[in-house]
């Protein structure tokens, strides 16, 4: 079956431009996560959706970052007035609601590599 | 706050050697999950294992094995008889519950780049 897909795979933006990154989760997956991975670092949590509700946005680095999932499936991460420090790979992951045992697995997409020049 | 430390930045071994990747974590939670992910050059994170904090049994899956020691807050990963295809960046991660449904965000270490030399 299809996995998590992200588009575009690569994005080059000039400093100050706005960008929108798209994530298509696995069909039926209720939970959706965004992570930011800087070069040479591990992914860092940005935000979490359960269906269309954004339950945690504690990892968003500034108010220039905004995420939405209006219909509970596709999600968009928007970065306004991009800065050089925004250059990173943005990973999306989706998962089912965990079972009573608390098990779940996050399936990751290939990421969008954003370069701000 | 949650923290995962992978002190080994890079490791190189000759093919067929065994190699152990270290992971040390910090958490105040009594219930948590630990994970290992593999990130090949293509960039996609590949899930390898999840371990419940209440289950300290070691696990073996083919050439992979994991040693979880709660007393030392460590969750080490060993690859036996390494192969060139094992070359990748490996991340250890720790979960933190963020909703009543138990869904969890992951805190990752900085990763260990493993190179298997043919």
Image (tube, coloured by chain):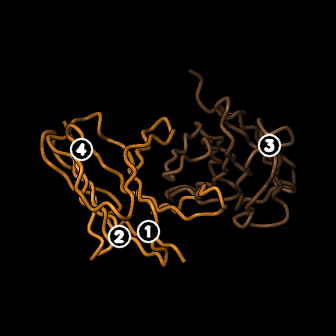
Chain letter, orange in picture: B
In the image: residue A2, left or right of residue B108: right
Q: Which residue is mark 1?
A: B4
Secondary structure beneath label 2: strand
Secondary structure beneath label 3: strand
Q: Residue at x 66, y 41 (%)?
A: A112
Q: Which residue is mark 2?
A: B24
Looking at the rendered structure, which numbered label has been put on residue B64? 4
Q: Is residue B1 visible?
A: yes
Q: Residue under mark 3: which chain is it in?
A: A
Compared to residue B19, the image places residue A95 above or below, namely above
CA separation, marks 1 and 4? Answer: 21 Å
Instruction: Tell how many labels.
Output: 4
Place residue A62 in its image quadrant: bottom right
Q: Residue at x 67, y 35 (%)?
A: A25
Secondary structure beneath label 4: strand
Place residue A74 in its image quadrant: top right
For disc 4, the neighbor class at 10 Å (few under 14, some 14 to 19, many from 20) is some
Q: Position of residue A44 (x, y in %)?
A: 59, 60
- Give the drawing colour for chain A: brown
């Amino acid at each position: 079956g299809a996995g998590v897909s992200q588009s575009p795979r690569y994005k080059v933006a000039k400093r100050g431009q706005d960008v929108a990154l798209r994530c298509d989760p696995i069909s039926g997956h209720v939970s959706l996560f965004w992570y930011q991975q800087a070069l040479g670092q591990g992914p860092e949590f940005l935000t979490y959706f359960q269906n269309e509700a954004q339950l945690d946005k504690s990892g968003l680095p500034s108010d220039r970052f905004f995420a939405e999932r209006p219909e509970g499936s596709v999600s968009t991460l928007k970065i306004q007035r991009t800065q050089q420090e925004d250059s990173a790979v943005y990973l999306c992951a989706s998962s089912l609601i965990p079972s009573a045992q608390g098990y779940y697995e996050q399936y990751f997409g290939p990421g969008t590599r954003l370069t701000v020049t | 706050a949650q923290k995962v430390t992978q002190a080994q930045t890079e490791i190189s071994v000759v093919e067929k050697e065994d190699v152990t990747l270290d992971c040390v974590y910090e958490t105040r939670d009594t219930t948590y999950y630990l994970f290992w992910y593999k990130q090949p050059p293509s960039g996609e994170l590949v899930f390898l294992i999840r371990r419940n904090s209440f289950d300290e049994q070691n696990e073996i899956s083919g050439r992979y094995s994991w040693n979880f020691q709660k007393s030392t807050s460590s969750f080490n990963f060993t690859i036996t008889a390494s192969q060139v295809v094992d070359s990748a960046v490996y991340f250890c991660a720790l979960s933190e519950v963020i909703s009543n449904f138990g869904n969890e965000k992951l805190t990752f270490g900085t990763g260990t780049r493993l190179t298997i030399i043919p």
